[in-house]
Amino acid sequence: MIELQCKQDKEAANKSRDFILALVEPWISTLCTDSDTKVTKLRENLAQRVETERGEVDQYTPLKERIQHIHAFSPYQPSISGPISVQLAIKRMLEMPLTLAELDSKYLYIYWCPGDFRYVKIGVADDVPQRLRGWEEGCKQEVQEHLQQGRGERIIVKHAFRVEKLVHTELKEVRFKKMGCKGCGREHNEWFNTRPEHAAKVVKKYSDWTATNPYQFHRARNSWKLDEHIEERKVEELSEPIDFQPLKSSVELPKRKGPLRLSTQKAKPRRYNKFG
C-alpha cells in the first residue's frame, strides 16, 4: 500500500514538473545561449510532452483553459525584398504608386500569444476585436493585443495597407513564419522577432508619415504617386530603420569588476574551539 502511494505521488510530481516546464519554456530562448537548432528541438520536445500530458485540444474547450501551444518558428524572407537591403527595400516601397486597396483607412493591430514569447504579429483590420477573436477561434490560442496609444485607444491609419507593407519591410530581417499552427494547421509568415514596443514605434513612424498626405493623384497617369515636391532627403531619412534593441534576459547576472585572480598562498589550518 505504501509503495502504491509513493508511486502515485511520484507520478503526480512528474506531471506537475512537466507542466511547469511548459509554462516557463518561453523564457528558455532568452536565457539559453545554445544554438538555434537545439533551442527549437527543446521547444518541440516540450510541446510534445504537454500534448501527451494534457490531451488534445478540442473546439468545446473554453479558451482560457486551453494549452498555450509552443510553436516552432523559422526565418522567412519575401521574394520581393529578401535579396536587397532594408534601406533600399523601404525606399522602393515609399516610391511605389498606391494600389486601390491602399487608399483605404483602417486599424493596424499588434498582438502576441502566451507560449510564443518574443514574436509579434502585425496586421490590418476594420474591426480589431473581431479580427483577434477570429485568430483565437481559428488557431485555438489566446492572443494578447498590444495597444499602441498611451490611453489604450485605437486610431485609424491612413493608407493602412501601405503602412503595413512598410512596417513589414522595415522588420524584414527579423521576420519569421510559424511552422504548422497547432490550431488550424497552416503556416503563418507575418510574425516578427521583436518587442511589441519596437513594433509600435515602427507603425507610428509610417502612420504619421501617411497622415501628412504624401501621395497625390496624377490625372495624366490615373494613379496615386508620391508627391514630387517631397525632397529626396526626406525619403532617405524615412528609409533608415529605427534602431533595433534586442531582447535582454530577465535574469541579470552580476558582473565581475576585475579579472579572476587565483591565490598562490597556502590555506592556513582552521582552528576549532571546544564546541567544534
Image: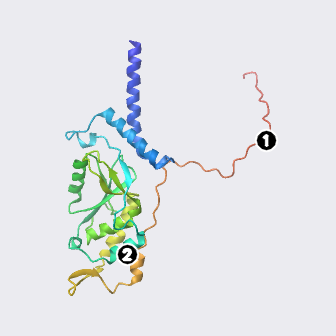
* Quarter of the figure with residue 202: bottom left
Which residue position is annotated with label 2? Answer: 91
| Residue 262, percent from left and from top | 73, 44
Pointer 1: what residue? 264
Q: Tag 2's secondary structure?
A: helix
Given residues 254 and 164, the one toward you in this image is 164
Pointer 2 local density, CA inside 10 Å: few below 14, some 14–19, many at least 20: some
Q: Say how the picture is coloured.
A: rainbow
Residue extending furthest toward the top: 1
Dot 1 lies on which element? loop
Q: Is residue 92 visible?
A: yes
Q: Quadrant of the N terminus?
A: top left
Rendered position, 112 above or below 79? above
Residue 124's image quarter?
Answer: bottom left
Q: Quadrant of the C terminus?
A: top right
- Residue at 45 percent of width and 63 percent of height: 244
The residue lying toward the viewer, choosing from 22 and 87, is 87
Q: Position of residue 18 (x, y in %)?
A: 39, 34
- Residue 177 % position (x, y): 34, 54
Q: Residue at x 42, y 69 (%)?
A: 85
Crowd rating for badge 1 (residues with CA inside 10 Å; few <14, some 14–19, many 20+):
few
Q: Is residue 22 visible?
A: no
